[in-house]
Image (cartoon, coloured by chain):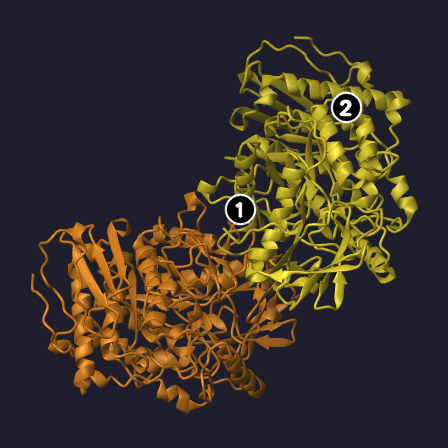
Chain colours: A orange, B yellow
Amino acid sequence: MSITREIGAHYTPGKGTLFTVWAPTATQVDVVLKDNDKIIPLQQEAFHYWTALSEETGPGARYTLRLDEDMERPDPASHFQPDGVHEPSAVVSHADFNWTDKHWKPLPLEQYIIYELHVGTFSEEGTFQGIIEKLPELVDLGITAIELMPVAAFAGSRNWGYDGVYPSAVQNSYGGPEGLKKLVDACHAAGIAVVLDVVYNHLGPEGNYLNDFGPYFTNKYNTPWGKALNFDDAHSDHVRNFFIQNALLWLRDYHIDALRLDAVHAILDTGAKHFLLELQEQVEHLEQQLGRPFILIAESDLNDVRIINPVEKGGFGLAAQWSDDFHHAVHALLTSEDSGYYSDFGKLEQLQKALQHGFVYDGLYSEHRKRTFGSDATANPARQFVVCSQNHDQVGNRMLGERLPQLVSYDMLKVAAGLVLLSPFTPMLFMGEEYGEENPFLYFVSHSDKDLVEAVRNGRKEEFSAFAWQGEAPDPQSEETFNQSKLQRTYEHSEKHRQLRDFYKALIRLRKSAPALTRPDKARLHVAADSHTQVLHLIHSGESPYLYALFNISNQPQKIKVVKEVGAAWKLVLHSDENRYGGAGIALPQE
Amino acid sequence: MSITREIGAHYTPGKGTLFTVWAPTATQVDVVLKDNDKIIPLQQEAFHYWTALSEETGPGARYTLRLDEDMERPDPASHFQPDGVHEPSAVVSHADFNWTDKHWKPLPLEQYIIYELHVGTFSEEGTFQGIIEKLPELVDLGITAIELMPVAAFAGSRNWGYDGVYPSAVQNSYGGPEGLKKLVDACHAAGIAVVLDVVYNHLGPEGNYLNDFGPYFTNKYNTPWGKALNFDDAHSDHVRNFFIQNALLWLRDYHIDALRLDAVHAILDTGAKHFLLELQEQVEHLEQQLGRPFILIAESDLNDVRIINPVEKGGFGLAAQWSDDFHHAVHALLTSEDSGYYSDFGKLEQLQKALQHGFVYDGLYSEHRKRTFGSDATANPARQFVVCSQNHDQVGNRMLGERLPQLVSYDMLKVAAGLVLLSPFTPMLFMGEEYGEENPFLYFVSHSDKDLVEAVRNGRKEEFSAFAWQGEAPDPQSEETFNQSKLQRTYEHSEKHRQLRDFYKALIRLRKSAPALTRPDKARLHVAADSHTQVLHLIHSGESPYLYALFNISNQPQKIKVVKEVGAAWKLVLHSDENRYGGAGIALPQE
C-alpha cells in the first residue's frame, strides 16, 4: 500500500480546522486566512506534508496556501472554490449536514438502470436543486440511478466537467458542496442511487496550479492533454493519495454510491500495483469501515478485462466498465454511419457478438485502430458491462451534437431502447433520450483565457476531421451553444415524445419485473442474427420465465421463425409497434 | 493473436530466396542484389508487406532494400551484416548447417547454473570460436548454461551488445551466423545450455534505419533512449511481429535454449494483451511444433510478479526474472556501499528477506525510488528468480568497472559465492567471477559517429553522478578500455585464484548433488539473520538430507548456536575456510 493521508482543510466541530498539503519543493508553506489576512505557518512532516491545526478557523473561512512566502495559491485539495478556480478556497464542514438517508439500502449493480445527466443542462436552472425538482419525473420513468457528469470545480460556469481543476471541490455554479449533498439525500429518499463521474487521468487547462506544489506530472508518458499525471514515477505515492482521498471523500462525506472513472486508459501506470487496483482496495477498506458497499465503474478504451477481473485472476477488481463496442455496434447498424471509429462496425453479427459477450473486439484486428485489439470477455458476468445507445460522448463529440432522433427513424429509436434495456448488461440512458429530446448536446466551455478558447476551438475541428461532417462547428465558448444543449422536456406536450417515453417506461418495468433480466446469465443467453430478415433474436433462458426479444432492424415488416430450441409456450408482454407507443399497430400473436 | 508472418530473406534450398519486408509508407519497394546490381521489384500484399521470390538468389548474396526508387537500406530483419551496420545485408541459409545436437536434452530451469559472458572479452580472440576453445574450462567448473550478452549486429567491433541495430543479424566480428551455430552445437555437445540476451526495448543509436520503413516508434511513451518502440499504437502488430520473429529465429534456427529479455520494463505496452504474453504464447506454439521446451527469462526493474505469474493468474507466464534486489542486498551488505540505488539496501534482514522470497521491495516504500515499489513474490517458486552477486551491469555500470575482488576481502568473495550458489534461486555467475578476475569490466563502444561518441561519454558521466565515485571515467570509445576488460584467467598461475575457483567448483558440485538444492522449496526454506553475530542461517528443509548453510558476514570468527528446530544429525560437507580454498583453516565440528 502506498502512503495515504488526509489532505486539504479538515474541519472538526469544537476542534477547528486541520490544514494539510503535500509540497515537496517548498521550504516554507503558510495558510493565509483571507477574512482577516492572518498567516498560519505550517509545519513540515514526513514526506513533505505540511500541516497545522487552526482552532479558530471554521466552515466558510476563505484561505490560500502560500509557498515560500511568495506564491499564493488555492488549495489543490480544496473542497470548495466559492469564487471560482483562481480565487481562495473555502473550509467546508462535512459534520453538520442533516442527512436523512439512514435507511437507504444501496442497490446491487444488477439493479442499476443508469440515467446519465449533465447538471448544467438537465434543468433550466442548471443546478443540483434543478435536478431535485425533476426527481419525480425520473422516479416515474423508473430509472434506479443517476450518473452525474463531473462536478469538480472548473473555470467559468459552462463545462462538461472534464476540465475540472479541483477534483475535490464541488462546482460553485452547480450549488457547491451543500447543493450536492442535498441532491444525493433527495435521490436516496426517492430510491435512486447516485453515480459520480470523476476524472483521474488529467486536469483541466485553466486554474490548475498543481505544478507549483510538486511533481504531479511525469515525463514518462504523453497523453492527449500533454504530460501524464504521475502515477508511477518518483513521488507518485502522493499523487495517488491525492486522487484516492478524492474517491473516499465522495463516498464517505457525500454518500455517493458509485464512481464512474473517466478514461482509465489515460491513467498510465506500469508499476507492479496499478493505481486502479490500489483505489479498489482503498474503497473496499472504506466499505468495511462504514459497512456500506460501493461500486467502481471504469470508462476504458482498452477492451481489457484486467480492469474488471477479480484480483485472484490478476485483475484490478473493479465492478464494471463501459462497453463502447456495444454502443458502436448499435449506432453503426442503425445509422449506417461508417466514418471515424464507426468504420469498425455496422454488421449485424457484430451487434450479436456485443450482446452475447460485451465486446466485439476481443483480440480481433481493428481496421480503424490499425492493430489487434481487446481481450476475451466471455467469462465476465453481464453486469460488468455498462451499455447505452447514447451518452454524452457519443452525442456530444459529434460536430453538431445530434442525438439519435436526428439520425434514425422513430421505430429505430425503440429498437435502440430495447437493445439497451433488454440486454443482459447494466443499461444506461442519456438524459432526454427517453422521450427523444431533439435539442443537441454540444461541446461547451467558458474559459477566461483567450488563447485557450482559441486552442479549444481548433482542437475540436481536428477531432472532427476523421468524420465526414460538413459545415461549421458551433462555438464551444458561446453561451448560446450551452443554452441550445438544455433539455426541452417535449414529452409534456408532444404525443410522439410521450409515447416514446411510455415505451421506455414499459421496458424499464419489464426489466425490473422479469427474473431473466434482474438476474441475467450470459452463459444462458442465446443471440441469433438473421442476415436475411435483419432480425435479431435475443433469448434469456436463465431464470424462468424465459424472455424472448425480437429486434427488426430492417425497415419493413418481417415474417420470422421463432428459434426452435426454446420451446413454444410464449406470451406477448411488450410490443413496440402498438399504437400507444406511437406504432402502426401491426398485430402480433399474443401467445 | 496479432498478425504474424516471416520477414527478411528466407532461403530454401532448390527454391531460392523469399524476400519479405513490412513497409507501410512506401509506394514501391525493390530488392537490389549487390553482386550483379539486379533489381527485384517486390509485390505489395496485405498490411503493406512487400514480397518476392528470387529463384536465383542463394546464401551469401548481398542485398539492400530500395524504398520508392530512392533510398537504399539494409534489411531491418537482416540475418547477417557481413560488412557492418551501414552496408548491404546477406542472405543466410539455415538449412545446411551440420547440427550434431540431435540427442541434446534441454535442461529444466531448476538445473540451470548460468555463466554470463561477453563474447568480445571472454577470450583473447573475442569470437564465438574463442568460447568454443574454452568450453572445457566451463565444463570443469561445472556450470550448466552460458548466457551470451547480445550478439545482434552493432556498429563497429566493440560493444556490450545493447546497441544492436539488426536484432536478427549475428555480429560479424564475433563470427556471424555460422560462428554462433558452431558455438551452440559445441555447447550442447559439452552438456551446456545456451541463453541468449535479446533486446526488445530499444535499438542502438548507430545504423538503425527502422524509421525509414514505418512507424516502429511511438510518441505515446518516452524511454531513456528516446521515443519508445511501438508495441501498442497503430501498426504495432507488425512491430510486435518483428521481435517475435526474432525470438523464434534464435530458438528454431540457432538451437538457442533460452532467451534473456533485456529490460522489459522499457517494453511499454498498456494494451489488453501485453507483448510479453504474446511472445510467451508464440514461443509455446514453437515448443509444440518442435517438441522442444524453451525458457524465457526477463530482466525487469519492476519487481512485478505479473511477468512470471501463470496466465490463469493474469500473468505473462514467463519462466523467470532477474532479482536485482538479491544482488543489491548482497552487494550493499558486503561492500557497505550506500550511494545510488545501494542506499535502499545494506541491512542483514534485507538479505534474509531476499533469500526467503526473491524480492526485498515487495510493496515497501523505496527511499531511492521515492515511491512504494514492487509486489509480493512469496507464492512464486524459487527457480523463477535468477540471482547473482556480479553481472555485466552491476560491474560494468560502475565508473571504474570494478569487480567484487576490488571491493571486498577474499573471505567475502566466498560468502558471496555461497549466497548465490546455495540459494534456492537460479544462480548466475559473471565470467571470471569464479577465480576472482581482477581486470575491470568497463563500458566500451566503437561508434563511427563523432557526435555520438561524445554523447555517450557525457551520458556515462551523468549516470555516475548519483554515485560518489571519484576520478575520471575510462574513455568508452578507446580500444584500450575494451582490452582492459578482457579476462586474464589468472587462476592458471595464481594459487589464490585457483583456490577460489576450487571453492566455486565445490559449491557447484554440492548444488548439483544435494536434492535440497536441485529441487529447492521456498516454502520449506528457513532463513534467520542474527544481527548480533552478523551470521546468516540458511536451512533448506524440503528434500532430505536437509542442507544448513551458515554465512558469517562479520569480519571475525563467531560462535553461533545452530537453529534448534532442524534437529541435530548434521554432517559437514563444505567449509570455506579450509586451506584448500585459501582459508585460514579454522576447524569446524565435522558432525
- The disc at residue B556 is 2
As drawn, is A206 to the left or to the right of B260?
Answer: left
Q: Is residue B53 above or below residue B213?
A: above
Whole-percent x, y for residue A470 in the image: 45, 86
Whole-percent x, y for residue B350 in the image: 63, 36
- Nearer to the camera, A54 or A159: A159
Task: Give the residue type that dot 1 points to.
Answer: Leu
Q: What is the quadrant of the C terminus of chain B in the image?
A: top right
Mark 2 nearby-residue class (10 Å; few <14, some 14–19, many ≥20): few
Mark 1 nearby-residue class (10 Å; few <14, some 14–19, many ≥20): some
Task: Give the residue type that dot 2 points to.
Answer: Gln
As drawn, is B339 to the left or to the right of A280?
Answer: right
Whole-percent x, y for residue B25 in the image: 63, 67
| Residue drawn at 85 percent across, 24 percent down | B497
As drawn, is A497 to the left or to the right of B457?
Answer: left
Do the residues at discs 1 and 2 belong to one chain?
yes
Report the residue marked by disc 1: B277
| Residue drawn at 88 percent across, 20 percent down | B495
Q: To which chain does the residue with label 1 belong?
A: B
Estimate the spatial distance between the alpha carbons at disc 1 and disc 2, rounded to whole Å.
49 Å
- Nearer to the camera, B357 or A111: A111
| Residue drawn at 86 percent across, 39 percent down | B485
Whole-percent x, y for residue B42 in the image: 65, 60
